[in-house]
Amino acid sequence: MLAKINKIRLSCISSQQNITFVSMKEIKPIAFFRSPLTSKFGIPRQSGLAGSLVGRIVFEPPYRREEALRGLEDFDYLWLVWGFSANRPSDGVQLTVRPPRLGGNVRLGVFATRSPFRPNGLGLSSVRIRRIVDGEIEVAGADLMDGTPVYDVKPYIPYVDSHPEAKGGFTDKKAWRLLSVTVPDEMARLFGAEELAALKEVLAQDPRPQYQHDASRVYGMPFGNKEVRFRVEGDVLEVVEVE
């Protein structure tokens, strides 16, 4: 009798898992993110690193209603669950990745990193709420590309979400090196003050691929409706052209 009961329980658990699996595969975006970063090149490697970078969460029609956001104005930060929509389709399971912070030379388990190359291609970011207007949320500090699908929005709750005493794994062992950014005055004048501050924060993160350190090479990245070109020598990044 006991064996029969256990068999029934296992059958129920299996059915529940199948139902969960099917429904998770059918999740749809509730919103899309709008950002001045229109390509993967230049996107901050973590949220919060470019605190002046402003973007908008634009909800899809069923959720673009005031009542869906009621009470959110009482919070300072949000969690965003989103998709790495610009990833190329994977040919198989990737169990290890090479974090840029470690120079791209050390492999760690995918679940010990925040690599975009994940089994389900989902990202998680903490962003600061600037304002809520007409069913849209303006936020700062995001690490999302323009057009990124957003699958869920949750308020950041400090007393349960903040753990300042926690170990940070490999991130505790090697600090991220920031670059000093110089923008000539004639080019700086092409940007508003807030836009320029955001651009400098993005560039200070050193958007170059980890394997490219040629001081003579000029790199380019789109920022809003402009193309920004720069080169890096040592710890200094110099903007050389803005179109």
Image (spheres, rainbow, N blue to C red):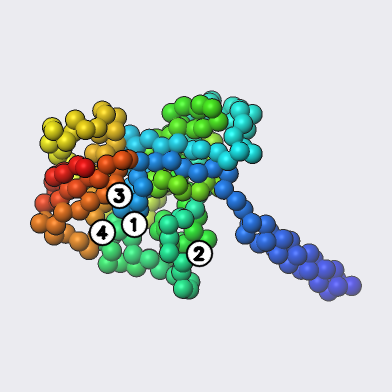
Which residue is at 26% across, 39% downward? 199
Structural crowding at the residue carrying mark 2, measured as other residues with C-alpha within 10 Å and reported as few (<14), some (14–19) or many (≥20): few
Which residue bears the numbered disc 2?
119
Q: Rounded to the nearest whole Å, what is the CA distance between mark 2 and mark 3?
A: 23 Å
Gap in Å between the C-alphas at discs 2 and 4?
23 Å
Labels 1, 4: front one: 4
Q: Mark 1 points at which residue?
A: 170
Circle nearer the N terminus (1, 3): 3
Whether residue 161 can be seen here: no
User: Where residue 2 appears, x then y in whole percent?
Assistant: 85, 71
> Which of the pair 220/113 is nearer the observer?
220
Q: Quadrant of residue 210?
A: bottom left
Please report the residue visible at 46 percent of the width from the left and 55 percent of the height from the top.
Answer: 84
Local secondary structure at mark 1:
helix
* Crowd tier of the residue under label 3, counting other residues whose Cα lies within 10 Å: few below 14, some 14–19, many 20 or above: many
Nearer-N-terminus badge (2/4): 2
Estimate how packed mark 1 is, as few (under 14), some (14 to 19) or many (20 or more) residues with alpha carbons within 10 Å: some
**Hey, what amino acid is under mark 4?**
Pro
Q: Give how far apart the Cα atoms at labels 1 and 4 are.
A: 19 Å
- Please state which of the two labelled residues, at mark 1 or mark 3, is closer to the viewer: 3
Name which of mark 1 and mark 4 comes first in the sequence. 1
Instruction: List x then y, in percent, for residue 104.
Output: 28, 64
- Numbered tag placed on residue 42 in the rendering: 3
Mark 1 or 2: the one toward you? 2
Q: Residue 112 carries which label?
A: none
Mark 1 near mark 2, Cβ–Cβ under 8 Å? no
Residue 209 is marked as 4
